Image (cartoon, rainbow, N blue to C red):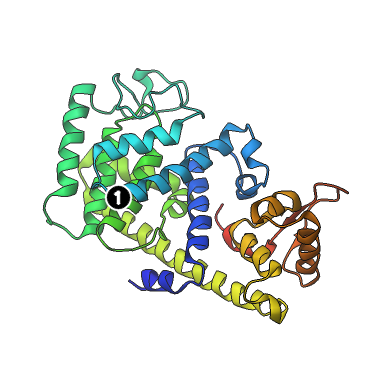
Amino acid sequence: MRLDTAARLIPNVELFISMYVRKEALISSQIEGTQCTLDDVLDPEVDGNVNLEVGDVINYVSACNYAIGRLNQMPLCNRLFREIHERLLVGVRGRDKNPGEFRRSQNWIGPANCTLNEARYIPPNVDDMNVAMTDLERYMNEGDDYDPLIRIALIHYQFETIHPFLDGNGRVGRLMILLYLMEQGYISKPVIYISYFLKKNQIEYYERISEVRKSGNYEQWITFFLEAVSAAAQDSLSTIEKLMALHKKNIEKLPVTARKNDNVRKVFDYVEQYPIIDIKRTAEYLGVSYNTISSVVRKLVEVDILRETTNAARNRVYSYEEYLSILRKDT
């Protein structure tokens, strides 16, 4: 796969993945109604931010990183889905919806505060849900009746139809797509996410799934899903190419002595991972004095890599705007 090859060639692949996971977390959470921006998520004071909507995104990042690590220890299975779910909902909206457990009561899908009678869709009852999840687990790990891309289209549809959790089904189901493609060897790094396509086509996304439930027409759903995967791969490839070009361009702006390993290069590497910074936290993270980081930041401002985004005399915030503009696409 061309995307996987490109990902292997990125100079700082882990930095790219770190940023792209956060972008996916944001968009997947936005599909579920979360109202925050990429800048909110990257705010240097985010650890002290009590905004539960930002917490939704941070939890998604944590759950994604956790799940990728667990793939080295176990296959995709119901246990892993429950572990992912627990990390998604800890301390945020939905924390009262049995994090880490399949539902023990009937749920339904419809407008906010609608009754069971007003629901657009009613998933299987609890007993049938448990049987269906056992069957789905078996299907994920047995046989090769279809191409893996078709199989994950069917798996995602089935998971969303079973709706095994009281909350968070969409986010778990979309993360499942990434994990399955990694497990099947389609990609070696977490560099493809389809949430941006599903967000842009959100009404159609739900309608296509509903059409399968109503008529059994899987073909129209699979066609839509494959289009989403193709678009996501193209988006990831384009983003990789743009970030690589930006990295190369701005490395050339650094003093020759800073292109290997001095404080200027350390701060430059840091802002590629955290493109919104303040001097105090940057100094603490890098173990360098405040005054040294302040001097380096001034140099990066002078060469148009960083831009001050506050007018305060103290606690100034700086952003790597060119980097952010690439990642803000579709958010």
Where does residue 294 sit, x and y in percent of width and height? 80, 59
- Position above or below: 166 against 22: above
Of residue 241 and residue 260, the one placed in the foreground of this image is: 260
Q: Quadrant of residue 50?
A: top right
Q: Residue at x 50, y 69 (%)?
A: 240
Q: Quadrant of the N terminus?
A: bottom left
Where does residue 157 sit, x and y in percent of width and height? 27, 44
Q: Residues within 10 Å of mark 1 (few under 14, many from 20)?
A: some
Q: Residue at x 39, y 18 (%)?
A: 115
Of residue 204 and residue 39, the one placed in the foreground of this image is: 39
Of residue 9 and residue 177, the one placed in the foreground of this image is: 9
Secondary structure beneath label 1: loop
Amino acid under disc 1: Leu
- Position above or below: 117 against 189: above
**Circle 1 residue:** 71
Q: Quadrant of residue 232?
A: bottom left
